[in-house]
Amino acid sequence: MADDEQPESSEELQPEAEAAPTPQDAAASADDAAEAAPAPEAEPEPEPTEAPAAAVDLPPEAPRAVAAAEQAQEDDEDEEEPTPREKPSVPGAHLEVDIVPEGVDPLGRSDSYQDSYAVDPYATDEDVEEAKADDDDQEGVLAEPIATAAIDLASGARYRATGKRKSAIARVTLRPGTGSYLVNGRTLEEHFPRLTLQRNIRQPLETVGFQDRMDVVARLHGGGISAQAGALRHGVSRALLEADPNLRGELKRRGFLTRDSRAKERKKAGLKKARKRPQFSKR
């Protein structure tokens, strides 16, 4: 019994071991299969490119420095340059002072436009000449004395009227004489030393042509020198109208009968003057 139960010898087990494939056999079979399979088509070889330039030997720290420089350049490009702060300009500081001498046209136009009357800047030379001729004719008519004046110069003739200008009042009396003026007991030159005022006062009598044949006696009060001169001229003109009512049209056309209504505007409450305001303070 003991001999029958002994296991089989190693010799009997050897065929089973030989039946198992070895790694060498598996490799050989794989090679045979590769040879039997059709060979794949060969891919075209890439065209030869230029050979890269010979690399320059750089120190080990060079790549880091180059990379840092490139990064710094990119950062500088990304950052926008700050806008420089400009000093606030004063309004009108760039303007130049332009002082125009007396008698010179401020617009720099030609001599044909340098007249006291207004002319269209787009007018032709013919229009300018016509305008000048019309103005010359008008000035000539106004400068000529009124030939139709018929004033009675009897010895006892007296023509009285009242003239006003601002707060000045002139009570005027015209009488036959030699053309003298008596203003508040004084001569015209003493009371009105300014030649412009003297010329304005004499205009009404010169217009009618009686500047040498009538005397003027006036009493003035109120206002200043200029206002009294305007009131006296107004009074003389109205007195001439009393002497000859037919002079109304000519005197009115020359502006002698128009009472100058211009006056100083009154002061307002809360203001320093008529329109001048106190300085505004925010705080």
Image (cartoon, helix red, strand yellow):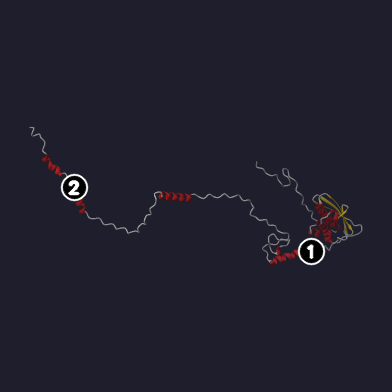
Q: Residue furthest top?
A: 1
If the image is split into quadrants, where does the N terminus sit? top left
Query: Residue 32, labelled with which disc?
Result: none
Q: Up-down: is 283 above or below 63?
A: above
- The mark found on residue 141 in the picture is 1
Q: Position of residue 170 (x, y in %)?
A: 84, 52
The answer to which of 36 and 170 lies nearer the viewer is 36
Quarter occupied by the C terminus? top right
The three-letter amino acid code for the residue at tag 1 is Val
Classify 210 as above or below 271.
below
**Vertical position of residue 78 compared to residue 141: above or below:** above
Mark 1, secondary structure of its residue: helix
Q: Which residue is mark 2?
A: 24
Question: Where does the image place residue 279, in percent across and percent down from the top left?
Answer: 69, 44
- Real-space Cα separation, disc 2 to disc 1, in angstroms: 145 Å
Q: Position of residue 144 (x, y in %)?
A: 81, 63
In the image, which is nearer the foreground, mark 2 or mark 1? 2
Residue at 79 percent of width and 63 percent of height: 141
The amino acid type of the residue labelled 2 equals: Gln
